[in-house]
Image (cartoon, grey):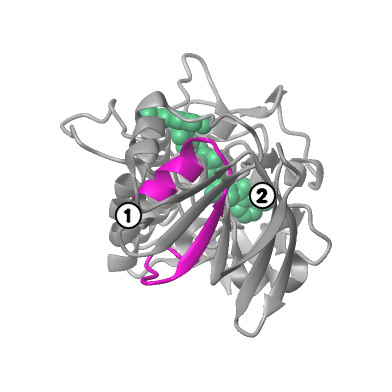
Amino acid sequence: LLYDIIILGAGVAGLNATFLASRKGLKTLTIESLEEPGGQLTTLYAEKQIYNFPGMTIFKAKNAVNALKEQVLSIGAQINYNETAVKIFKEEDFFIVKTNKSQYQTKRIILALGKGSFIPREIGIDNEADLSEYISYLPGKIINQKNKKIAILGGGDSAVDWALHMCEENNISIIHRRAKLRAEQLSISQLEENKKIYKYIDYSVVSILKEDKSLMIKLKNNNTAEEFSEKYDHVFVNYGFTTKLEILNQTDFEFERKRQRIIVNGEYETSQTGIYAIGDLAEYNGKIDNILSALNDANHCINNIAKKILKSSGIY
Ligand SMILES: Cc1cc2nc3c(=O)[nH]c(=O)nc-3n(C[C@H](O)[C@H](O)[C@H](O)COP(=O)(O)OP(=O)(O)OC[C@H]3O[C@@H](n4cnc5c(N)ncnc54)[C@H](O)[C@@H]3O)c2cc1C
């Protein structure tokens, strides 16, 4: 199967490109390393209000992602989640995208990789990988849970926001390893006033063990060194993410770069013919790193590609 376009990354830039390309009837595949779309909006600030979206006043990042996701689903576009692109190279007249699961042939590639793939900061316990069924680093798996006892680890904006958001339907504990929360003051006040959420501030996780279908979490009070264990159904880790743009070192091509970004021309094409870059990864004069700019990059890029395809088939 030879695709017209393979889009790497399903952040807002990649999602919009997927939607627009599919609408134009281009054979498109999108590859996303996370289990859900939205990139930075999903991983870094899902509950944050967006104030710079024209015509929208009360609007959270997750709402923007859900709206884009619905649009993409409605058109039947193909997005492969939990799949990471690891190498791109050229073979005869087309490109090969190699992932951790498979490899695909395409006429063009759109790089919508943002700041790179997100790697969650882990709890750091030895048996963490064995407990993967019970530990989440993104909200996707647990967001619609009800009547569960969930330990939210972390003390930044996302930990506090998710605790406030999930406490209506679940029994929530927030466990923070430092003495002070590092969230917006308004959210901290809401958390402090919330009687439903158990707060273990300045407590460390000593160990997590599987017990039947639950987890036994041993906590230590950092002030008194007192230890005790509690049973939970699930752990939601909010220690943040690091990013890695490794794939740009795994190609046969030298892209014209400005630090971590790829320079594109007026058509969003990189110095390598047939490979495009959009969103936070793309660099051009007057570039702004925001949602609208990422959506707009996708719009221009797909239009330019569609024009070329139609021209080569004699339609334009
Ligand atoms: C804390 C914070 C708050 C912000 N607030 C606002 C705001 O209020 N308003 C606003 O307009 N902008 C805001 N921004 C900026 C905005 O979020 C970004 O400009 C936008 O998300 C860029 O989207 P993108 O699609 O280019 O990249 P990303 O969102 O980074 O998406 C890139 C995607 O590519 C995937 N990926 C990476 N490598 C691979 C690989 N090898 N294989 C497969 N998939 C891969 C990643 O998993 C990710 O999903 C904010 C940014 C931050 C960090």
Task: Give me the residue at 60% from left, 61% from top.
Answer: 106
The residue beneath circle 2 is 120
Asked if disc 2 is less than 8 Å from ligand 1, the answer is: no
CA gap between label 1 and label 2 equals 22 Å
Residue 137 visible to an observer of this rendering: yes
Task: Give me the residue at 45% from left, 58% from top.
Answer: 172
x, y (%) of residue 251? 79, 47
Bounds of the magenta span?
A: 142-164
Q: Kindly identify the amino acid type of the residue bearing the numbered disc 2.
A: Pro
Residue 147 in magenta? yes
Q: Kindly identify the amino acid type of the residue bearing the numbered disc 1.
A: Asn
Mark 1 neighbour density, 10 Å: few (under 14) some (14–19) many (20 or more): some
The residue beneath circle 1 is 66
Question: In the visual, does 24 lie left or right of 250?
Answer: left
Describe the element under mark 2 as helix, strand or loop: strand
Residue 229 in magenta? no
